[in-house]
Image: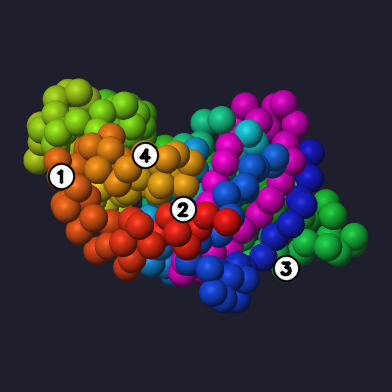
Amino acid sequence: MIKLLKSGLFHSTDKFKKAKETLTRYSNKYEIELYVEGEGESYVDGVCYPHQKGRILCVGPGLTRYSKKKFACYYIHILADAKLSEFLAQVPTSFFATHYNMVKDAFLEVISLAGKEENKLLLQSRLYELLHIILSDSKAKVNPEEKSAGGNRTIQRAIRYIGDHYFEDICLKDIAEHVNFSPVYFHNVFKEYMGLTIHKYIEETRLNKAKEYLLSSDFSLEEIGLRCGYKSHSYFAYCFKKAEGITPTAYRKNNLH
């Protein structure tokens, strides 16, 4: 049995009119989202997932998350028993829906049935159908070579490698060698799954860590830049302002209370 806690269409600009980022929060349920538009990204346990039409995000209990505006998504929040949790454990955190219209229609039907006691049994059926489609789409691979290589597991290996080495002078070639793919092929696979290039993902990871240091440490800007993989303070400041619109100093001042 699935317990549906909440469902609907979420527009970030309606909920967060001024804030550029949502507050970091801890998830105690399954939160499944289908993005229909977006320009920002969501962070799940520090990993960046861009908001793009057709991307599905599946956040399980025990994970922390926050998002950057702006985006719109259909969503369901559910509680799952042990058997269903085993099912959901097969779903990666993020992937593209290969049957976008089918998934969207399934979300819409669940949303239309929610909250109506007379539709309780039908709602359960539609929830299982939605989750079945999501699981099927999550197993779709880019091509036969990627299928034999383990699909999303390869992307997760790359993400973990970046998380362990972002402060070093790493590049596409290093990461491709780590997952045993050619650089050109892996560039295409990574971009297909994540919606951005390896270079951009490394940059997002470094900036995300830099913001953590700015708000949780007394390190100088030079020290933070070096800890996050920037070769000089000036280059760190340049990259930060280009991405965030303000300097690291201003970001620290504006967000510390």
Tell me the CA gap for discs 4 and 2: 26 Å
Q: Amino acid at mark 4?
A: Phe
Say few, some or many: other residues with alpha carbon within 10 Å of mark 4 (under 14 / 14 to 19 / 20 or more). few
Disc 2 marks a residue whose amino acid type is Ser
Q: Which mark is residue 42?
A: 2
Mark 4 lies on residue: 219
Q: Position of residue 15 (x, y in %)?
A: 62, 71
Q: CA distance from mark 3 to mark 2?
A: 26 Å
Q: Which mark is residue 112?
A: 3
The mark nearer the N terminus, 2 or 1, is 2
Q: Which mark is residue 215?
A: none
> Nearest the camera: 84 or 5?
5
Residue 30 point in image, percent of width and height:
65, 43
Query: Is residue 93 among the parts visible in the rendering?
Result: no
Q: Quadrant of the C terminus?
A: bottom right
Looking at the image, which is closer to me, 45 or 242? 242
Image height check: is 13 above or below 199? below
